[in-house]
Image (cartoon, rainbow, N blue to C red):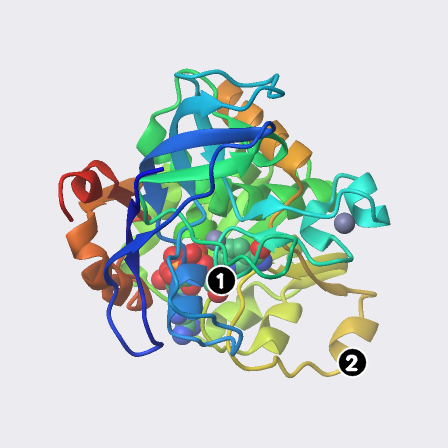
Amino acid sequence: MPRTRAYAAQTPRSPLAPFEIDRRPVGPRDVAIDIEFCGICHSDIHQARDEWGNSIFPMVPGHEIVGKVTRVGAEVKRFKAGDRVGVGCMVDSCRTCPSCQKDLEQFCQKGSAFTYNGTEMDRKTPTYGGYSTDVVVDEKFVLSIPAGLDPAGAAPLLCAGITTYSPLRHWKVKKGDKVAVVGLGGLGHMGVKLAVAMGAEVTMLSTSKGKEADARRLGATGFALTTDPATFKKLAGKFDFILDTISANHDVQAYMGLLALDGALVLVGVPSEPAKVHAMSFIFGRKTLAGSLIGGIAETQEMLDFCGKHGITSDVEVIPVEKVNEAYERTVKSDVRYRFVIDIASLRKGG
Ligand code: NAP
Ligand code: ZN
Ligand code: ZN
């Protein structure tokens, strides 16, 4: 197979730069994909900069992948050349443990094979992500992109979409529920769109005054600035469900005070430092503080089909691969509306 062009971080402090990798030959259950678009998730930045302390270098980030199938192995049944497909945060799992049996491959007890900054299930072969021209993935971990969805706008559904859809479903958010989404970035804007499509009454809690009009355009009926201490008094006890997507360290306990009786605050953002929360903030009001990790493959397909039905995609700023380092800086400054997506044609041309 010809070598694959990619962009990689060589160390936690070096900018991303051109790199070449080898993809495996197409096996009987494999799907070979020419990548068209890859979203930039804040997790790419955390890991490229080793902010979680688990990074492996060189690293080719990218787990919001959309592309076209070029070849399939002899045993592949669900895909054929020319199909538009997606790949998210995982490329394999053990398939036999209790989590895998329940379609929760993200919680595979042997440890799922993540799309990058990980290894295949042999625990030796490094995985490289979607800032690259092509990828070879087992059919079970390949998703169908519904016809009619813009491919660049669909790419972020593979992580930002499923990460917000899964907790909304698991905590059974329904029509009329009062939901707050915290942080209007890649995850947050998908959280607003999806919660609104599920019938919830959504309030956006943000540090950015300039995002109010966008929050309302996305379907939020309320907006409050978390930089104003009065917000935490005014909205105390108001929400059935809070989805916290903040990427930076912040006072989680303050947000617990916004929950109604039996309400749940679900963390999906992963700041580098542990959160400090007093037991009292759960005890009074029988509240839940929980976390949620992406979603299983079956649920990811369910989310894509839901987005196909409701015409939901991400609001994207499409960039050539040469602008990836600038896009990282802007994302860290919350200056993204609302997801950067790399046009991989720019990498194919020379990058
Ligand atoms: P993003 O696009 O950068 O959005 C994060 C948002 O958080 C910002 O737009 C900003 O919103 C808010 N924020 C940033 N710094 C803040 C601060 N110091 N205080 C308060 N709010 C702040 O990031 P993303 O791609 O959505 O990812 C968000 C987090 O989720 C990251 O930590 C990422 O690693 C994690 N993640 C988790 C999963 C999972 O499975 N659990 C999956 C994907 C990503 P405002 O401007 O509105 O305040
Ligand atoms: Zn992600
Ligand atoms: Zn497993």
Q: Which residue is mark 2?
A: 280
Q: Which residue is mark 1?
A: 117
Circle 2: residue type: Met
Find out if the beta carbon at label 2 lies less than 8 Å from the nearest ligand 1 atom.
Answer: no
Q: Residue furthest right?
A: 98
Q: CA distance from mark 1 to mark 2?
A: 38 Å
Image coordinates of residue 345 in percent, x first then y, are 21, 36
Which circle's residue, 1 or 2, is located before the other in the chain?
1
Do we see residue 348 in this rendering?
yes
For ligand 1, give the image quadrant: bottom left
Give the residue displayed 45% in from the left and 48% down from the top.
63
Image coordinates of residue 298 in percent, x first then y, are 67, 32
Circle 1: residue type: Asn
Please indicate whether residue 111 sits to the left or right of residue 275 in the image: right
Dot 1: element: loop
Do we see residue 175 in this rendering?
no
Which label was assigned to residue 337? Answer: none
**Looking at the image, is mark 1 or mark 2 nearer the viewer?**
1
Classify 274 as above or below 266: below
